Structures are given as structure tokens and as C-alpha cells.
Amino acid sequence: MIELHRWLENIWWQYVPPPLWLRAIEPVYTAISHAHLKQRSKHIEQPSLPMISVGNITAGGSGKTPFVIWLAGCLQEHGYKPVILCRGDGGKAKQAVLVQSSDDPAIVGDEARLLANQTGCPVLAALDRVAASQLAKEHGDIIILDDGFQYRQLHRSCDIVLIPAEGVGNGHCIPAGPLREPVSALKRADLIVRTGKVDSKSLSSVKEWKWSANPMKLRDVKQTGQTPPTSVFAAAGIARPQRFFDDLIRLGLDVTGNRSFPDHHRFSLQDVQDLTALAEAIAVTAKDAVKLTPLWPETKPLWVLNQQGSGEPGLLEAIMKQTGLSKN
């Protein structure tokens, strides 16, 4: 299954037509997806607070989690108390859960735990985000809906769509390409934000803002006191992990090898043993670290690459204006 997914992703992000048999399946997916999204939009609920949705139209890897962390921090700096609403991918909680920094990622989801750890904001993880949105007023004054563009059941004051620097790949919908929806769906967006080092053409007639997540120095989450390494073995269980590997190289590190796991992978003790046997210094993403830390040997460093978000001048102001917020 992992190899199939890698094979598909390789096809998706090449700028050549995908195989004919994938293109034959594409209209079936598109029709089912369109019907599903249309059904979702029949009953749109009003959340208890103004809501900013952060989503995408491509399958994974557009930078939603670091963008949400950046946006939450910006709103906090202006005196707001954001509540983050997420689906809890990678977890199995069915009812709304107010995520704590000590919660098991296998229950609440790895992204939810990361968001709680890094923002200090209340994070509600729930499959039923409509129900969770009604609880948000007990915890803050503005909602950030993570991965919300296709979640049409909730009214949003600002609809942000993130598109990675690479654009939309081959331009086809799943399974022939990376698109969850056709590019024409961008007409629903209030703001389009290109993430990463953008060198591809504009995808819409409206202004496309730029935002990037810049790699910071490695941090040892086990706090062993060891000096940060100059060479690492990289491991990642995220969508499109090559960008993580490239970020390590951008920091000037010698990446001696790498290993990819499926997105939201639930690491086991065997995984940890396999990784620690590969190299002295292992570098992972912040999302993977919340799952690996409890399993990792106490005397061995676990090097994590954090990121710092940066938006072009005017982006935050545009978000606040669309949402009806003022600078406090």
C-alpha cells in the first residue's frame, strides 16, 4: 500500500498526463465527490463564534498545520483567543475532545496534539465539527477550522485555501492527480495563499498571497544535553516527506539517509528500534515527535525540526478584514 501511494504521488506531481486507466476512474471520483460536497452544503450551520477556515484543494502537503500555528499566534498577539477545531486525523475519538498536552495522539490525533502543544490555544478534536463548533464559545472568541475547505456544513467568515509552491501537480483529480476538487473550486475561496517558494504561475484572477514555513535549528525533545549534530538520518510520517528532507539540507545538515512512513503513521516500539539502529542522530518532524517521544529511549536524543511561519506584508490584515476583526 505504501509503495502504491508513493507511485501515485510521483505521477501526481509530474507535469505529464497520467495513465489512461487512472484518467478513466477520475470522473467517477469527481462525480461522487461533487455529490457528497453538494449534500454537505444543503444544511450549513452557524458556529458559535466567527470562523476562519484553512484548507486546500490538493491531497496533503500544503502546509496547513504550520499555517494554523502561525495564524493562531498572530491572532493571540492582537488580543484574540482562538479556538482551533480539527478532525483529529490519526486518532480515534468520536466525541469532541478538548486536547491536552498529555493526551495520547492515538486517541486525539497527531495534528491535534501538535497544535495544542505549539499554540497554547484550546484545541477541539472531533469527527463532528459542527457539534464541536458550538462548544468553542466556552473556550475563546474566534474559531480556526483546520482542513475546512471541503467541510461545507459550517458557515465561515473567511475561507482560506492553501496551495503548495508546486501548484496543483498534473491538474487532475484523485486518483489521476492530487486534486480533491477541480481548480474551479477556488472561486469559493476568500483568500488564496501560496505556501513555500512559489515559482509557478497564478491559478486564479485574484491576488494570491505568499506564506512560507522556514526551518529552525534542531531541538532535542528528550533534553539529553547533547550537542546538535551536523549529520542526521531523517524519518517522516507526513504527506510528501521530501520537503522535510530538503529543509534539513537547507539548514546545512548532512542527511545520510531517510525513511518515509505513511501520513499519520502510528509508530511502534519496533519502528523505534529500527530507527535507532540506523544512525546515532535521528531527525523527525514536529508532528511525528508527539508520537515518537513516549516510545523513544530516555538517554538517546530525538532531534526535531521546528518551523517558523512568515507571511508577506498585508496577509494577516487581509485575513482580519475578511473576518471582520480589528487590531486590538
Image: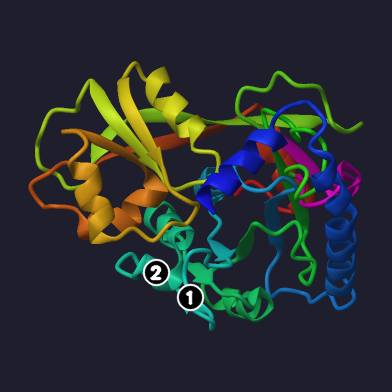
- Can residue 190 be seen from the camera position used here? no
Q: Is residue 298 above or below residue 225?
A: below
Q: Is residue 153 above or below residue 185?
A: below
Amino acid type at mark 2: Ala
Instruction: Identify the residue at horizontal 10%, vertical 42% (top origin).
Output: 224
Task: Kindly identify which residue carries mark 2.
Answer: 106
Q: Nearer the viewer, residue 250 or 320?
A: 250
Instruction: Identify the residue at horizontal 92%, vertical 31% (top origin).
Output: 205
Badge number at residue 92: 1
Badge number at residue 26: none
Please state if 110 lies on the left or on the right of 64 as rendered. Answer: left
The percent coordinates of residue 216 (x first, y second) are 37, 29
Q: Dividing the picture into quarters, in which one does residue 20 lie? A: top right
Q: Earlier in the sequence, mark 2 or mark 1?
A: 1
Whether residue 189 appears in magenta in the rendering, the answer is yes
- The answer to whether mark 2 and mark 1 are in CB contact below 8 A is yes
Q: Nearer the viewer, residue 87 or 241?
A: 241
Magenta region: which residues?
179-193
Q: Is residue 231 above or below residue 291?
A: above
Q: Nearer the viewer, residue 23 or 92?
A: 23
Instruction: Identify the residue at horizontal 41%, vertical 55% (top origin).
Output: 114
Image color mode: rainbow
Judged from the image, the secondary structure of the residue bearing numbered disc 2 is: helix
Please state if 249 lies on the left or on the right of 63 as rendered. Answer: left
C-alpha separation, residue under disc 2 versus residue under disc 1: 7 Å
- Can residue 170 be seen from the camera position used here? yes
Label 1 crowd bin: few (<14), some (14–19), many (20+), radius 10 Å: some
Q: Is residue 54 above or below residue 46?
A: above
Amino acid type at mark 1: Lys
